Each structure stands twice: as structure tokens, then as C-alpha cells.
């Protein structure tokens, strides 16, 4: 059982906060798709004939690709990899790309899960983010997607900016609930150094994130969503039962995945690989059959840190038996010491340790305390 991630590194315009790998120059789109097709040929054996149960087009903005471009990649994957017939096939979309026609074509291609980046319903905030859509288009895009027959829809939101207070965030959550979607990913705004927001923050034009307000919004979100049938199965991810992201859950549970496209990461239980984060370098290396990724063989220490980092944030938590079996008695002793030291932030259910609400607010710090 494994998954495939395809990174589509193009966007219509640059959002002020985003430091994912993308370019607003789409001139190289065709060359890049051809390079991805070539990469599929080169890497199809990476997952050693595992069945592919999930395919995830992320970005950047995959919905920027035409139907025939998406079809080319999907057909190649279906031809070369062992994709199961009921695979979860997700595509990240921006609201402004979703027309009735586009949605019907995406359905035809076999996409069965749509991830729509709404981010906010506040017009001023959307402008400040430099999003390519307004709030009305966001709401309409979800309705259009439902009308097109998609039954597994997830939306992305960002909280914690200077535009959100408790009142506006409560209204946002009410609007979200009225949309009747199956899944929500909500991220605390982070100020990334190389973005426009980061530069403006450095110059003193933009304020720092108010951690206390963010924490209040996080707590309100957990309470509201959980009392409306959503399960927080990862710190930033809420799903109705049976609608957790299979792709991301497999990743958090340590399954193997192949990442295609510039900046994509791969993991097969032994090594981790990451592709070059440049569209032109990716295309040119593939065309010249040169190496286009870096690779590291994971040490036991790295495997342990990775286990903590991914599992601690989830509902599945860290299993003491698994830790002892995989990493040995000494590592388990250290694990137990940290759990005991910060016991106010953990829930112990038999041998499984998960974070409580206060723990979730300190997840990165707590994970680092476990690291070897
Ligand atoms: C890289 S985007 C790709 C999806 C799509 N292009 C979109 O914008 O909706 C994935 C998600 O990451 C989140 N994100 C990106 N940068 C962020 C930041 N600095 N802080 C918080 N969330 C961020 C946004 O919610 C976004 O929807
Ligand atoms: S948030 Fe999405 S649309 Fe905006 S720049 Fe990042 S990847 Fe592109």
C-alpha cells in the first residue's frame, strides 16, 4: 500500500504568505509536464510494485492545468503504476478555477476528492493575502463542486491573522458548517521569511502573530467542529467519520510514497529523497538525464524523530510497544521520561500516548523534547 504525490508548481498570482515552491510564470508548463511523464518512467519501480491506493495532485495550483494535461499525467500513472480501481484521487483547486465545465471534466478524469483553498471569507483579508478570488466565489465554488456530484470535499482555511478576532472567527466557522463539506484543513498563519508578508513583517509594516489570539481561535475551532460531527484526526485536519484524507493519513502512519515534480519528497522506508525546488533545473536535469534529487539513507535516530513528529500530531498517537520494538528499550525509557515530565499535556490510553488540547498548542516543542 503506497501513495503518489504530484507537485504542480504554478499559481496565477503569489499569495503574500506562501513559501511553497511555485512560479507565476507558466511558460514552461508543457515542458514541465513532459518532465513529470519522464520522471514516472524513471521512478515507477521506487515503490517496489506496491499497490497505489492514493494519488494526490498538490501545489502550487494543480487546477491551473488543463483537462488534457491532467489526463496525460493520470493516464501515465495508471499505465505504469499499480493503481487500485477505487484509489482516492485528490486535486487541490483554487476557487477561481472551478467552473461547471471544469468540475465535470475533473469528475470524468476520476478525481474523487477535491481540496478547495478558501482561506478566508473576509474580503479585505483575501485582498491582503493577494488571493485570486473573493468570498462570494469561494462560497459559489463549493456549491458548484457539490452540484457536480463530488461527495468528498475538503476546504483550506487560515486563522490567526490580524483580520481575525473571536467574533469574526466564530462567523467563519458558522459559514464553514453551512457549506456541508466532509473535511476541513485549518492552518495557523505562519510568517515565512522569504514571502512578501515576511519582508513586510521584517520592515515593521506587518505585526507579529498574536499567539494568544491564535490559541483562542484554535480552541474555538476544535470545540465548534467537534460538536458538529468532525473529528480532529490531526492538529490541522478535521474530517467527518470515513472522510479522513487517506493520502495524508497514510503519510502520517509511515506508509511509503513517491513524490513527482519539482520540490516533491519521496520515502520508501529506507531512504528519503527530495527533488530540486526549481522548475527550470528540474526540467533541464530530466531532459539531460542528470540527477535531479538528493537522497539520504535514514538512520535509526532519524526514523525515530520522524515517527514522533508525524504520529504525535495525530489521533493515532505514539505507541509505546511500537517504540520499544522499533527503536529499543533505551529510547522507550527516554520517551517515558518526557511523557512524565510534561504529563499535563498528554493523554495515555493503555500504551498509546496522544496530545490533549493544551499539548496540541505546543506540539512542535513537545516533539522536539522527544528527539534523540
Ligand atoms: C500550498 S497551498 C496549495 C493549495 C492551493 N494552491 C491554495 O492556495 O488553496 C496549501 C495550503 O497551505 C496553506 N498555507 C500556505 N502557506 C501558509 C502559511 N504561511 N501559513 C498558514 N497556512 C499556509 C494554505 O491554507 C493553503 O491552502
Ligand atoms: S497559497 Fe496556493 S495559490 Fe497561493 S501562492 Fe501558495 S500555492 Fe499558490
Image: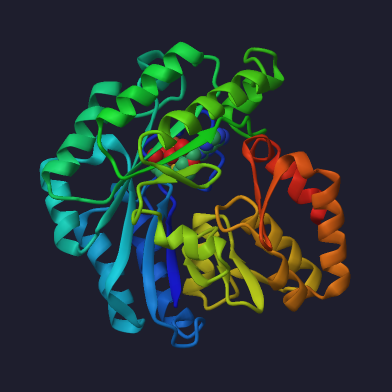
User: In the image, is residue 291 above or below residue 28?
Assistant: below
List x then y, in percent, for residue 247. Answer: 43, 62
Please tell me which residue lies in front, 364 or 284.
Answer: 364
Residue visible at 44% across and 63% down in the picture: 5
Q: Is residue 302 left or right of residue 319?
A: right
List x then y, in percent, for residue 31. Answer: 37, 62
Q: In the rendered view of the protein, which quadrant contains the C terminus?
A: bottom right
Residue visible at 51% across and 75% down in the picture: 288
Residue visible at 26% across and 28% down in the picture: 178
The picture quadrant where one finds residue 191 is top right
Q: Is residue 234 left or right of residue 150?
A: right
Q: In the rendered view of the protein, which quadrant contains the N terminus?
A: bottom left
User: In the image, is residue 126 above or below residue 65?
Assistant: above
Asked whether residue 210 is in view, the answer is no
Asked whether residue 137 is in view, the answer is yes
List x then y, in percent, for residue 293. Answer: 61, 69
Rendering quadrant holding ligand 2: top left
Amino acid at each position: 500500500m503506497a501513495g503518489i504525490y504530484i507537485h504542480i508548481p504554478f499559481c496565477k498570482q503569489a499569495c503574500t504568505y506562501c513559501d511553497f515552491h511555485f512560479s507565476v510564470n507558466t511558460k514552461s508548463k508543457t515542458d514541465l509536464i513532459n518532465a513529470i511523464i519522464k520522471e514516472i518512467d524513471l521512478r515507477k519501480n521506487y515503490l517496489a510494485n506496491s499497490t497505489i491506493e492514493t494519488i494526490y495532485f498538490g501545489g502550487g495550483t494543480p487546477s491551473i492545468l488543463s483537462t488534457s494535461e491532467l489526463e496525460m499525467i493520470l493516464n501515465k500513472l495508471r499505465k505504469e503504476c499499480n493503481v487500485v480501481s477505487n484509489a482516492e484521487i485528490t486535486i487541490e483547486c483554487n476557487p477561481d478555477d472551478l467552473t461547471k465545465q471544469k468540475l465535470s471534466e475533473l469528475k470524468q478524469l476520476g478525481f474523487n476528492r477535491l481540496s478547495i483553498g478558501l482561506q478566508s471569507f473576509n474580503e479585505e483579508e483575501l485582498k491582503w493575502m493577494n488571493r485570486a478570488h473573493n468570498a462570494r466565489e469561494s462560497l459559489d465554488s463549493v456549491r458548484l463542486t457539490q452540484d457536480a456530484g463530488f461527495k468528498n470535499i475538503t476546504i483550506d482555511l487560515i486563522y490567526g491573522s490580524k483580520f481575525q478576532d473571536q467574533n469574526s472567527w466564530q462567523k467563519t466557522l458558522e459559514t464553514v458548517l453551512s457549506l456541508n463539506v466532509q473535511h476541513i484543513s485549518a492552518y495557523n498563519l505562519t510568517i515565512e521569511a522569504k514571502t512578501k508578508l515576511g519582508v513586510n513583517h521584517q520592515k515593521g509594516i506587518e505585526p507579529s502573530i498574536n499567539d494568544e489570539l491564535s490559541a483562542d481561535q484554535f480552541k474555538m475551532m476544535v470545540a465548534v467542529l467537534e460538536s458538529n460531527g468532525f473529528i480532529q484526526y490531526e492538529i490541522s485536519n478535521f474530517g467527518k467519520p470515513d472522510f479522513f484524507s487517506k493520502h495524508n493519513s497514510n503519510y502520517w502512519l509511515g506508509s511509503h510514497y513517491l513524490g513527482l515534480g519539482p520540490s516533491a519528497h519521496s520515502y520508501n522506508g529506507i531512504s528519503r529523497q527530495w527533488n530540486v525546488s526549481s522548475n527550470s533545473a528540474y526540467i533541464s536535469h530530466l531532459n539531460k538525464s542528470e540527477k535531479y534529487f538528493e537522497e539520504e539513507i535514514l538512520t535509526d535516530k532519524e526514523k525515530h524523530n520522524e515517527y514522533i513528529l508525524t504520529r504525535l500530531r495525530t489521533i493515532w498517537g505514539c505507541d509505546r510497544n511500537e517504540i520499544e520494538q522499533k527503536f529499543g528499550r533505551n529510547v522507550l525509557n527516554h520517551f517515558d521520561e518526557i511523557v512524565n515530565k510534561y504529563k499535563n499535556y498528554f493523554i495515555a490510553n493503555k500504551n498509546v500516548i496522544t496530545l490533549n488540547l493544551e499539548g496540541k498548542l505546543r506540539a512542535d516543542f513537545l516533539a522536539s523534547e522527544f528527539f534523540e
